[in-house]
Image (cartoon, grey):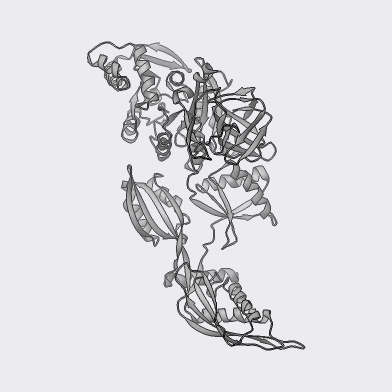
């Protein structure tokens, strides 16, 4: 099995949306003979994008898996989404790869998602290569992309190839190792001499290339400096060593649309990208002792794996996709889930190939495999041998940036919404759903508006549940500003027993965040002990709806200090009503004010957008708390009213060209400025009347 592990290449394809990851995957599958026709995104017939929502939008929204054999090596591809809305899935599935390929559009260049994907690869210390795509397009520029990549990325990119021709005239590549041109016609390359007008450039670039790869081999650099000739075999060996050690990042180029350069790129993946054995042992820990342990890519070690993706299907059930680190699995059996502390059984081992699942007899180190119908296992869990427990770290979902209120189109569908969404949450860790205790709305939170819209489409397609999306209500609250003393009296006489409750309360404001306090200051039995809790209950129920706009009243103390009762007509209900009347009267006299939730916001942005962002924050009634530097980016901390920030994601994208990100969490409640409060109260009360 060692030979099999050594010949395996787990490669993740990364880029911004539209750069051509899926097209590159489709071309490689076609050239290797896995598919008998070339799938095209525009025609909606690709192997890797098969979800109806992906076909409709013409872009990946979920990671897909497939394999092909090339030069006796098995290359296992992970085609990830390039849209920031689905980057949690990208990051989750990246962890199953041993090497990353960043695809860059030669026209659009490096976009924010390319930068973010590169940061993920750095975080996971994955060897990388760059494929510059779409060189056949108008305004494509290989050299501009390379220059930008050199400035933005580390380790440093190095050219492995040069393009022959440009735009419509792009027809091949020059290999700087063999110093030959490869000219393409109908996807087939023919070897040729380097064109005369490119010889000088090619020689200069080769010299630079040799200098760069020599950095990966001390002996080679000595020979090079002494003027010795270096063989192609030496160059290839150093190229692989430097790629695996992340000394540099090889840059290749081509066009998936014209099938230029893809076969040479496949050779590179086979020859230079890492196998699981190259990556070495994976570290984990013993969850009981906290002690660090590791597992090698060895079939004879105890079984261990981690779950990278869950697919939920209303008919087929839950499909669990995982990367095996050590040991092996047979066609059926069981393993232990460390996170859930539960044993799981499976009766069929599967390999994922696009939308198909093929039964396999066994799987070992490095393999990405799947099983169905596990009971408790979800994305991020570690699976292992029950007698040899280990737990691997797994990245957390990216921050949730937007929330929408879900309103069912059909009455009585609320329970169905929760049960269906819980299944979608299993397959998408970037989502969360909750019922707001303040507004009673069902809130669905995710990475962006497109993310939420696609979730709603899936809800309808998979579970036949339809909802409307609305901007969530802001959970305003009310409080009081001064101390007052009032009487609450409830007296009702009708035939038989009447109702009588009479209480005096002092109401005063408390510091922010102190909530509600009730003080019993009754002396001399002015009100019997049995009725005092009823007064408190009346105040608690009444404070759920304040006097300004019906929002809960918070941060006040009510002191019950006097009252009267009737030996026959008094009751708990009467004193409860008296307490609520006292609360309402006190609120009206105690200078009531409207409070709004203030959010703590952390915004990360390139330096050049700082001024625009701070100006925008000031316009949103924000308060900048501080600024910090994180690598090449600036981090702004601020406090902003929730009402001004509910639709901030598109605003930030617009200001930063998609290069800014933010995280938001609740901080505290603060008073709404008086000029805004009056207008707001009028609008809310009008809406209620309507």
Outermost residue, front direction? Answer: 289
Residue 638 drawn at (x, y percent) = 38, 57
Image quadrant containing the N terminus: top right
* 178 left or right, relative to 296: left
Pick whichever, 544 or 519, lies toward us: 519
Outermost residue, left direction? Answer: 226
The image quarter in which residue 231 lies: top left
Residue 200 drawn at (x, y percent) = 26, 17
Image quadrant containing the C terminus: bottom right
Is 474 placed above or below 55 here?
below
Pick whichever, 538 or 14, lies toward us: 538
The image quarter in which residue 210 lies: top left
Residue 40 drawn at (x, y percent) = 54, 28
* 360 left or right, relative to 187: right
Asked if residue 436 can be seen in this view, the reply is: yes
* 368 left or right, relative to 633: right
* Residue at image point 57% right, 86% down: 523
Residue 74 drawn at (x, y percent) = 53, 20
Is 91 placed above or below 28 here?
below
Is 435 placed above or below 337 here?
below
* Residue at image point 36% right, 24% down: 166
């Amino acid at each position: 099995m060692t030979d099999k592990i050594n010949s395996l290449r787990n490669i993740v394809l990364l880029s911004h949306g539209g750069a051509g990851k899926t097209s590159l995957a489709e071309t490689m599958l076609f050239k290797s003979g896995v598919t008998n026709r070339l799938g095209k995104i525009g025609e909606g017939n690709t192997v890797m994008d098969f979800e109806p929502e992906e076909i409709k939008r013409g872009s990946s929204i979920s990671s897909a898996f497939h394999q092909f054999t090339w030069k006796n090596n098995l290359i296992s591809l992970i085609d990830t989404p390039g849209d920031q809305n689905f980057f949690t899935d990208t990051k989750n599935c990246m962890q199953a790869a041993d090497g990353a390929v960043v695809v860059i559009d030669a026209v659009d260049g490096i976009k924010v998602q390319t930068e973010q994907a590169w940061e993920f690869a750095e975080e996971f210390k994955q060897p990388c290569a760059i494929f510059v795509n779409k060189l056949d397009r108008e305004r494509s520029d290989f050299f501009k992309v390379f220059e930008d990549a050199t400035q933005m990325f580390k380790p440093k990119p190095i050219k492995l190839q040069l393009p022959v021709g440009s735009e419509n005239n792009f027809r091949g590549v020059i290999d700087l190792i063999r110093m030959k041109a490869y000219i393409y016609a109908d996807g087939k390359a023919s070897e040729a001499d380097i064109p005369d007008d490119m010889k000088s450039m090619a020689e200069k670039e080769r010299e630079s290339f040799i200098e760069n790869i020599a950095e990966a081999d001390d002996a080679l650099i000595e020979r090079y400096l002494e003027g010795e000739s270096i063989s192609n075999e030496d160059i290839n060996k150093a190229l692989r060593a430097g790629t695996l050690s992340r000394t540099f990042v090889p840059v290749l180029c081509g066009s998936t649309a014209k099938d230029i350069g893809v076969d040479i790129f496949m050779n590179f993946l086979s020859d230079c990208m890492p196998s699981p054995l190259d990556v070495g042992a994976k570290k984990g820990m013993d969850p009981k002792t906290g002690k660090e342990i590791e597992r090698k890519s060895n079939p004879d070690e105890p079984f261990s794996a981690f779950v990278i993706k869950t697919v939920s299907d209303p008919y087929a059930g839950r499909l669990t996709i995982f990367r095996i680190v050590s040991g092996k699995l047979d066609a059926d059996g069981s393993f232990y889930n460390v996170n859930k502390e539960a044993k799981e059984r499976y009766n069929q081992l599967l390999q994922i190939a696009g939308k198909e699942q093929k039964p396999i007899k066994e799987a070992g180190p490095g393999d990405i495999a799947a099983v169905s119908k596990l009971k408790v296992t979800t994305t991020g869990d570690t699976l292992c041998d029950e007698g040899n427990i280990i737990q691997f770290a797994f990245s957390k979902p990216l921050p949730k940036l937007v929330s929408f209120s879900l309103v069912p189109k059909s009455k009585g569908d609320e329970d169905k919404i929760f049960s269906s969404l819980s299944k979608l949450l299993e397959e998408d860790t970037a989502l969360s759903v909750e019922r707001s205790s303040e507004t009673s709305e069902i809130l669905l939170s995710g990475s962006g508006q497109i993310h939420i819209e696609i979730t709603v489409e899936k809800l309808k397609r998979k579970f036949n549940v339809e909802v409307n999306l609305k901007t969530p209500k802001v959970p305003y609250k009310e409080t009081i500003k001064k101390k007052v003393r009032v009487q609450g009296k409830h007296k009702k006489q009708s035939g038989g027993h009447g109702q009588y409750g009479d209480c005096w309360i002092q109401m005063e404001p408390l510091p922010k965040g102190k909530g509600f306090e009730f003080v019993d200051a009754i002396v001399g039995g002015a009100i019997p002990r049995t009725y005092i809790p009823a007064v408190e209950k009346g105040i608690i129920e009444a404070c759920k709806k304040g006097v300004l706009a019906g929002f809960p009243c918070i941060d006040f103390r009510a002191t019950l200090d006097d009252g009267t009762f009737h030996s026959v007509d008094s009751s708990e209900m009467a004193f409860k009503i008296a307490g609520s009347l006292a609360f309402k009267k006190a609120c009206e006299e105690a200078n009531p004010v409207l409070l709004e939730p203030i959010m703590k916001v952390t915004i990360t942005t390139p330096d050049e957008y700082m001024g625009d962002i701070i100006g925008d924050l000031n316009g949103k009634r924000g308060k900048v708390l501080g600024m910090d530097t994180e690598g090449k980016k600036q981090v702004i901390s601020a406090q902003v009213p929730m009402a001004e920030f509910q639709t901030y994601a598109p605003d930030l994208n617009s200001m930063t060209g998609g290069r800014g990100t933010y995280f938001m969490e609740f901080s505290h409640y603060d008073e709404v400025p008086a000029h805004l409060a009056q207008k707001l109260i009028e609008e809310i009360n009008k809406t209620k009347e309507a």
